Image (spheres, rainbow, N blue to C red):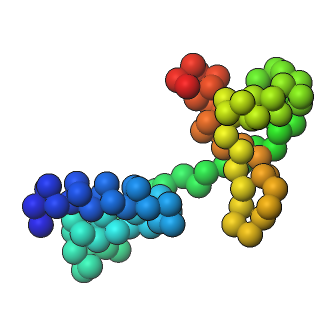
Amino acid sequence: MLPTTLDAIKSILRADPSVSVAERARLMALLRKGPEKLDAVPVNVPEPRILRRDEVARRLSVSLRCVDRWAQIGMLRKIKLPGCTRAVGFLDSDINSLITGKI
């Protein structure tokens, strides 16, 4: 398969929110190596970690009210689980980005 075709498929998979990171990595490995070598390709994808708002407040050294305000103005993105109506927390990677100043 051409590298440009692989790039196009990777972009499509990245844009699809229903495909998880682990599934995307497995599909790309399958396309690159073929089905017979799929078991030989280790795919180590860290699972996203969700932090509760009290843990976010503690890590950022701010109040709970400040965390709520930052979520309200869009500085922090709330995460909802499928089938839930309320947000359960914030992504650890988003908090780390905020701490390191990459947001």
Residue found 21% across the figure and 65% down from its top: 32
Q: Residue furthest bottom?
A: 36
Residue 18 falls left or right of residue 10? right
Give the total of numbered labels. Answer: 0
Image-quadrant location for residue 77: top right
Residue 22 is at least partly visible in this image:
no
Residue found 22% across the figure and 54% down from its top: 7
Instruction: Using the image, determine if residue 18 lies above or below residue 71.
Output: below
Image-quadrant location for residue 31: bottom left
Q: Report x, y in % for residue 97.
A: 58, 29
Residue found 57% across the figure and 19% down from its top: 101
Choose between 90 and 42: the one closer to the eye.
90
Q: Report x, y in % for residue 21.
A: 47, 58
Residue found 16% across the figure and 61% down from its top: 5
Residue 57 falls left or right of residue 92? right
Q: Residue furthest front?
A: 73
Image-quadrant location for residue 59: top right
Question: The C terminus appears in which quarter of the rendering?
Answer: top right
Instruction: Using the image, determine if residue 79 lies above or below residue 2.
Output: above
